Each structure stands twice: as structure tokens, then as C-alpha cells.
Amino acid sequence: MSPDIDKTPDLLGPEDEGLLQELRAAARHLDPPPDSVLEAARASLTWRTIDAELAALEFDSAVDLAATAVRGSEGPRLLTFAAPGLNIEVEVSPIGPRRQLVGQLVPAQEARIDVRHAGGVTTVRADQLGRFGADAISAGPVSLRCHLGDAPSSPPVVTEWIPL
Amino acid sequence: MGASIDVRDLARAAAAGDQHGWDGLVERFGELVWSTTRAYGLNPGEGANAAQTTWLLLAEQLGHLEDQHERLGVWLAATARRESLRLLGAARVATAAPNSPPATEPAAGAQGREALLWRVVRELPEHCRRLLRVLLTVPPPSHEEVSAALDLPAAGIAAARAACLQDFRHRMSNFSIRTEPEGS
């Protein structure tokens, strides 16, 4: 039962260690991760896309403008994802427990877009001007997977997951 | 050292699509991710949202994180922190009610000494409440993981922990004095 020896010196005395163990037991009983959270975590691997090009979240008005947000401002949330050679801009509007997305591919091009969300996968098309829209997206983590019309043989572009 | 090799093996297997390897990562770090979201005061629904986003991000990026497979706990803690702050930011914009701490009532019906301990934890100043919530993870997180979860320098964690436990003891003794007459 010897504790793991950490490389960093630890000042934890036996009294503190005992108290921490007691508190740890309390945390386990009173605030454990819900089974549904662990189940969703285990299921997450099935959502990965092999060989996808990742589009990173570059801008999120909810975070990047939060410091300067006008109190009570009701405009849509704006997101920008960036991959090499492609930007994906999305406006998000809440409609009750659902989310409505209106988006734009830059540069403009046709594409098939899988909107992946808690309710499943909603597939929509971006038109020649790169515009797309999706309704009735479930609140919670959302990711877009874009199969670009200009390059049907190249890997899809997948955005980071973001809770909407 | 053994633990980090295990994590690396699990990560390599999971990156190749092995569900057992992935489940091993969830078992190892599931509580750390959850504790981090709770440390920031997210309620259980928001915490679930932030935790799920964190795991989905890992699933998508695991293949690109080969140089961090040994330190996945640090990556997960930092990501859970970022997603928790994002949800807090989004909620603040949506409600225009800055700095209203969400309620984090523990399970109703909790009784006895554990309930008392938990109540005192929740009465601690915010920095101590956060630190303890992450430290109380099973298995206990490394200092680097705590540092990533809370954006604190790793070198200061042992001292902060000692001070917060001291504060906790002080409050517990006050609490005992306040409630003593009931026992007579």
C-alpha cells in the first residue's frame, strides 16, 4: 500500500492525507459523474472521422465578445472555424431547446454537410454560393462534417465539437 | 511511472479505433473531466455538456495528439476547463446575468458526517472550493493535471492545498462548536 512516489516533493502529512481520503469518499458519494455522462464519453469514439481535416474554432462570439457584450443583446451567436483553404462561418439561433444554423463556406463552393448533434446527423447542402442552413438541431455538442464539391475525393473537413 | 505507460498504451489503442482502449481512458479520466466542470460551478446539465464535448474533442483529435499521449490527463483537464469557461461565457451572454453562480446542490438526502463535510467544502472561498473539487478526483490527479484544470502554477499547488485544508479544519471546528448543544 505504499503511495506512488511522485517526482515533485509533496508536503502532504498523514493528517491531511486522511482528511483528503475522507473528502474523496464524500465526493464519490455526493457528486459522482452521472452514469449518462460516462456512457456518452464511452460512445464518443464512434463519432470520430478517420483521416479528416480538422477545422479549428477560431472565433466564438459567446466567448470572444463576452467581455464587451451588450447586456441583453439577442443577436445570433457567431462562430468561425478554419481549416487550410477553407473557413466555415456559422450563425446559431436558439429556438426553444433546438438550434437553427445558418452558414457560409469561404471560399464559396458546393458541399454536402453533415451536422452531427445529440439528435443524430442532419445532412444539408451548401449551394454554389457556399450558403447552407439547418433547423431543429439538438442543443448540446455539435460538429459539422463537410464533403466539399470541388474536391470530392479529398478527406472531409470536420469542425471541432462545440456545445450549442 | 507505470500509470503513464498504461495511459500511452490505452491512447495508442484508442487512436487506432480500439473501443477497449478508449473505455480505459474514460475509466481513468472520467472523474477528472467531471470534477473540472464541477469545479467551475457548472450545474449537472451544463457539466454533462462540457464533459461530453471534451470527450468528443479527444476522440476527433487523438490521432493528432501523439506527442501528448503520455500526458492525456493534462490535455483533458485543460480542455474541460476551456469548455467549462465557454459554457459559462455563453450562459452569461444568453442571460445577461454576469457572475451568478449556478446552484450545485449535492444529492438530496445526504446525511451524517459526509453531508457535513461536503457542506463545509461548499462554504470555502472559491479558490479553495475549486482546488479541492479537482483534488478529490479518483484516481487522485497529478499536480500537472490540477494545474491544467485550474490554470494554476503546478509549483504552488501543494502549498495552496495545505492552506485550504487548514481553512477547512478551522471551519469544521467552528461548525462543531455551533452544533454541539444539540448533542446534550
Image (tube, rainbow, N blue to C red):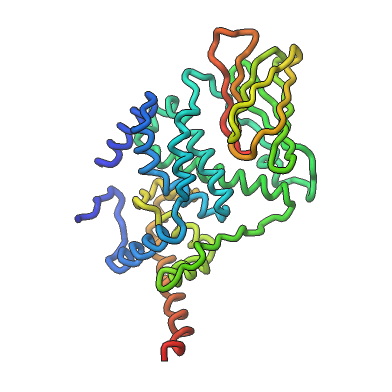
Q: Is residue A101 visible?
A: yes
Query: In the displayed image of the protein, which residue is found farthest to the left?
Result: A1
Residue B86 sits in quarter:
top right
Residue at (64%, 20%) from the top-left corner? A113
**In the displayed structure, would residue B120 be above or below residue A52?**
below
- How many numbered discs, if any? 0
Give x and y (percent) for residue A15.
30, 69
Q: Quadrant of the C terminus of chain B?
A: bottom left
Residue at (59%, 22%) from the top-left corner? A145
Residue A32 sits in quarter:
bottom left
**In the displayed structure, would residue B168 be above or below residue B130?**
below
Query: In the displayed image of the protein, which residue is found farthest to the bottom?
Result: B184
**In the displayed structure, would residue B10 be above or below residue A53?**
below
Q: Is residue A7 left or right of residue B146?
A: left
Give x and y (percent) for residue B136.
40, 57
Residue at (57%, 53%) from the top-left corner? B42
Give x and y (percent) for residue B89.
65, 47
Residue A160 sits in quarter:
top right
Q: Nearer the viewer, residue A64 or B12?
A: B12
Q: Is residue B146 left or right of residue A2?
A: right
Give x and y (percent) for residue A72.
79, 49
Q: Is residue B101 left or right of residue A133?
A: left
Q: Is residue A108 left or right of residue B25?
A: right
Q: Is residue B167 visible?
A: no
Q: Nearer the viewer, residue A132 or A159?
A: A132
Q: Nearer the viewer, residue A149 or B110?
A: B110
Q: Quadrant of the N terminus of chain B?
A: top left
**In the displayed structure, would residue B145 be above or below residue B135?**
above
